[in-house]
Amino acid sequence: MSRFNFKGAIKMLAFALMFWSIGYAQAYDRTVANNLGKTRDALLDQRSHLAAKADEIKGKMTELDKQLSIVESYIRDTESAIRNIDDAIRRAS
């Protein structure tokens, strides 16, 4: 009879251990889910920050493209003026 009680005690212990581990796993799952949620929120914030920075850089690039076009136009005008002067010098010689 003591052997039967020993088996019963082992079964009860195994049963209790199983429920304890399930509870621990659920608590672990909640911790993991909370950490993943925080990580996701941080990544969303980072994405927003990066998108805003990209928009800022695009605006600067647009402004720089306008300035570059103006400078290139001045260079073309200067080259044309140099050619005109060179032509005038050749004609005068």
Image: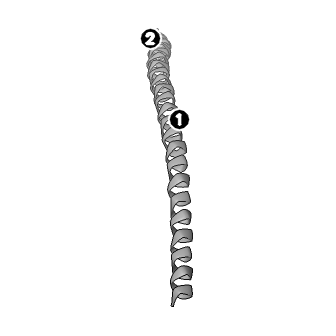
In the rendered structure, find residue 55 and report the number of the disc placed on it: 1
**How many numbered callouts?**
2
Label 1 with label 2: CB-CB less than 8 Å: no
Identify the residue shown where x is 51% and y is 43%. Answer: 63
Q: Is residue 85 above or below residue 64?
A: below
Characterize the local packing of mark 2: few (<14), some (14-19) or many (20 or more) Cα atoms within 10 angstroms: few
Identify the residue shown where x is 48% and y is 16%. Answer: 30
Task: Report the amino acid beneath label 1.
Answer: Asp
Q: Position of residue 93 (x, y in %)?
A: 51, 91
Characterize the local packing of mark 1: few (<14), some (14-19) or many (20 or more) Cα atoms within 10 angstroms: few
Direction bottom: furthest residue: 93
- Residue 10: quadrant of the picture: top left
Q: Nearer the viewer, residue 62 or 82?
A: 82
In the rendered structure, find residue 80 and report the number of the disc placed on it: none
Q: Label 1 vs label 2: CA separation?
A: 68 Å
Task: Report the amino acid beneath label 2.
Answer: Ala
Along the polypeptide, which appears first: circle 1 or circle 2? 2
Q: Secondary structure at mark 1?
A: helix
Identify the residue shown where x is 46% and y is 18%. Answer: 34
Colour basis:
one colour
| Camera-nearest label, 1 or 2 | 1
Q: Which residue is mark 2?
A: 9
Q: Is residue 19 above or below residue 50?
A: above
